[in-house]
Amino acid sequence: LAPKGLFLDNVIRVGRDELLVECDYEHEAQNQLRMKQLVDTDPILTKENFVVPDVFLKTSSDPQTELTTKQILVMEYHKGGTINTGLSIQSQEERDRVGNAIFY
């Protein structure tokens, strides 16, 4: 079933390790905050209205209360699309605008 030379035990190990990292929401929160910083300080992406939602780590009224934990990721809501939304854009002009902003 598997291609010759594929070490299935390594594939399973790497998959398991990656899943553990992806499901660590404190780690994901730090990645998202870093991406937000990069997007928010980029003049082209901000001009084109790209937004990365903010992450809420603790409550403002009680800094001891954690909102984001290893199992829960709390972030602000922004109505809009995702990168994948670009696949369904009909206007070539809009597709070009989005592509240019992402890959400038």
Image (cartoon, rainbow, N blue to C red):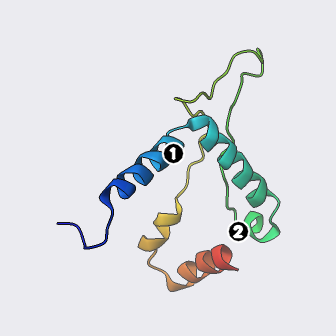
Residue 70 in the figure: left or right of residue 4 = right
* Residues at discs 2 and 1 in contact (Cβ within 8 Å): no
Q: Secondary structure at mark 1?
A: helix
Q: How many marks?
A: 2
In the image, residue 104 sits, relative to residue 56, either above or below, namely below
Front-most of 44 and 79?
44
Could you say which quadrant of the image residue 93 lies in? Answer: bottom right
- The residue under the point 80% across, 65% down is 42
Q: Which three-letter amino acid code belongs to the residue tagged 1?
A: Glu
Looking at the picture, how far across and down is residue 76, in whole percent? 63, 38
Could you say which quadrant of the image residue 58 lies in? Answer: top right
**Label 1: how many Cα within 10 Å (few below 14, some 14–19, many 20+):** few
Front-most of 77 and 8?
8
Tell me how far mark 2 sits from mark 1, CA to CA: 29 Å
Q: Secondary structure at mark 2?
A: loop
Looking at the picture, how far across and down is residue 78, in whole percent? 60, 47
Front-most of 68 and 79?
68
Residue at the spot of label 1 = 22
Q: Quadrant of the C terminus?
A: bottom right
Q: Quadrant of the N terminus?
A: bottom left
Looking at the picture, how far across and down is residue 27, in whole percent? 63, 40
- The residue under the point 63% across, 24% down is 67
Residue 43 in the figure: left or right of residue 9 = right
Looking at the picture, how far across and down is residue 25, in whole percent? 57, 37
Residue at the spot of label 2 = 48
- The residue under the point 33% across, 54% down is 9
